[in-house]
């Protein structure tokens, strides 16, 4: 018989934490955002973590690590990026486990001040498991499409499968003397942030504050998070933050400075990270965000041409899905209406408002979460 367990702000040294991490590492549809280490990082950012596990004969077989604001005003969301962790190969069991997770989240929703749970697993868009019990979210918090590079091949075969321009620029960067150094500790945070600030201003993308990267390295480096710098004659030309967890390595952040752009330092960084990920035992290199059509307005369009030079194949996921707790949703509607002058709140919460309407009328789903953002 399946048993459900609920843990708030998990102790990373506990037996449950170790067993959970082992399950997540082995599940290709999950990832580092479901890990205990990532939960500790988000805790430092003001998000409490909630772990719901489902066990069979005292062994965890599924669950979800969820995040929500520690001091929520009104109703908030429970969010499981790269989750839930389910036996996706066994649909019947996966459906049963998912149902238990949702019921437990609903049972705890009042104390957590949550009106809905949101999940974004790394399963293909053709998978109907979530769609059968949840609503499609209006936005995705993690990239729905990405680019995977197969690391099971030899370095020579990986190079051979790249576009000619990619191979050429990697070799050019080497000939021009670009060196890659690793500095995977908190002392690298300021140096890394300096590169990212210069890159974000030039390419016009938003960037988290320095405290985000400082906390990330303090929590995850050097075992999960690694930082590489491209240098030439004491000049820092670029930086890359790599996450290795389970079978997948993720290019989470990266950028180049305005110095010596003709050295193609960005190509040297990527190739070094790819080799480092392969040496670490990963079988997949994830470019984290990709638009194969490079459509105008797509968040990842301007960087996808660069990423495509390294080969690989596009992967598309099912995207974010949400399940609403009707009682908590009704409370949220009534509270919102009471803040609007001259609105009659006696009509009842079930008088026709769509769930999406509630979320779009002032409820911010992103401001307090910032689970992870674009990489460049």
Image: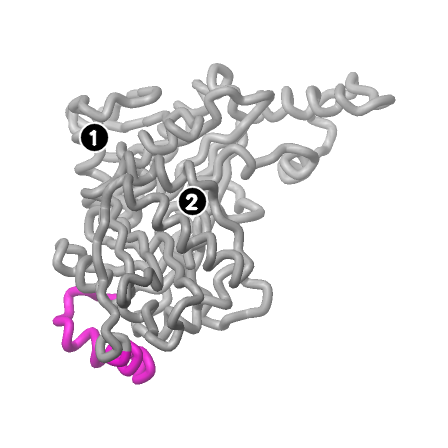
The magenta region covers 149-172
Q: Residue 63 lies in what quarter of the image?
A: top left
Read off the residue under disc 2.
Answer: 372
What mark, if any, has residue 60 been given in the picture? 1
How many neighbours does mark 1 have within 10 angstroms: few (below 14), some (14-19), or many (20 or more)?
some
Image coords of residue 30 (percent x, y): 30, 45
- Residue displayed at 64% across by 23% down: 332
**Residue 247 appears left or right of 315:** left
Mark pair 2, 1: CA separation? 27 Å
Comes first in the chain, label 2 or label 1: 1
Say whether residue 167 is magenta.
yes
Q: Residues within 10 Å of mark 2 (few under 14, many from 20)?
A: some
Query: At x 39% / y 53%, what residue is drawn?
Result: 127
Provide residue 158's location: percent of width, then percent of height: 20, 74
Identified at 48% across, 26% down, the residue is 69
| Residue 84 visible, this angle | no
Disc 1 secondary structure class: strand
- Quarter of the picture containing the C terminus is bottom left
> Considering only vertical position in the picture, is 132 above or below 72?
below
Mark 2: secondary structure: loop
The percent position of residue 253, horizontal first and vertical second, equals 37, 54
């Amino acid at each position: 018989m399946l048993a459900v367990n609920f843990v708030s702000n998990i102790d990373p040294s506990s037996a449950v934490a170790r067993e959970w991490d082992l399950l997540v590492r082995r599940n290709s549809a999950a990832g580092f955002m479901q890990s205990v280490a990532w939960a500790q990082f988000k805790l430092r950012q003001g998000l409490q973590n909630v772990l719901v596990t489902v066990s069979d004969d005292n062994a965890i077989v599924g669950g979800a690590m969820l995040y929500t604001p520690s001091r929520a005003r009104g109703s908030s969301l429970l969010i499981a990026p790269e989750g839930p962790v389910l036996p996706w190969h066994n649909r019947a069991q996966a459906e049963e486990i998912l149902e238990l997770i949702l019921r437990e989240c609903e049972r705890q929703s009042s104390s957590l001040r949550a009106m809905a749970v949101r999940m974004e697993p790394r399963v293909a868009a053709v998978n109907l498991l979530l769609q059968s019990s949840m609503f499609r979210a209006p936005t995705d918090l993690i990239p729905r499409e990405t680019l995977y590079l197969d690391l099971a091949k030899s370095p020579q075969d990986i190079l051979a499968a790249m576009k000619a321009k990619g191979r050429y620029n990697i070799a050019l960067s080497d000939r021009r003397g670009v060196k890659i150094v690793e500095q995977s500790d908190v002392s690298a945070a300021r140096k890394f942030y300096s590169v990212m600030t210069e890159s974000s201003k030039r390419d016009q993308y938003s960037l988290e504050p320095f405290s985000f990267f400082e906390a990330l390295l303090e929590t995850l480096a050097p075992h999960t998070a690694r930082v590489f710098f491209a240098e030439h004659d004491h000049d820092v030309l670029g930086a890359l933050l790599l996450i290795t967890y389970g079978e997948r390595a993720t290019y989470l952040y990266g950028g180049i400075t305005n110095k010596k752009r003709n050295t193609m330092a960005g190509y040297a960084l990527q190739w070094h990270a790819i080799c480092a990920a392969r040496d670490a035992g990963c079988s997949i290199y994830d470019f984290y965000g990709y638009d194969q059509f490079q459509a105008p307005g797509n968040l990842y369009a301007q960087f996808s041409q660069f990423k495509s030079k390294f080969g690989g194949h596009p992967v598309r996921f099912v995207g974010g899905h949400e399940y609403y707790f009707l009682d908590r949703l009704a409370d949220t509607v009534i509270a919102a209406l009471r803040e609007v002058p001259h609105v009659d709140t006696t009509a009842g919460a079930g008088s026709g408002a769509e769930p999406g309407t509630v979320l779009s009328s002032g409820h911010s789903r992103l401001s307090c979460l910032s689970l992870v953002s674009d990489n460049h």
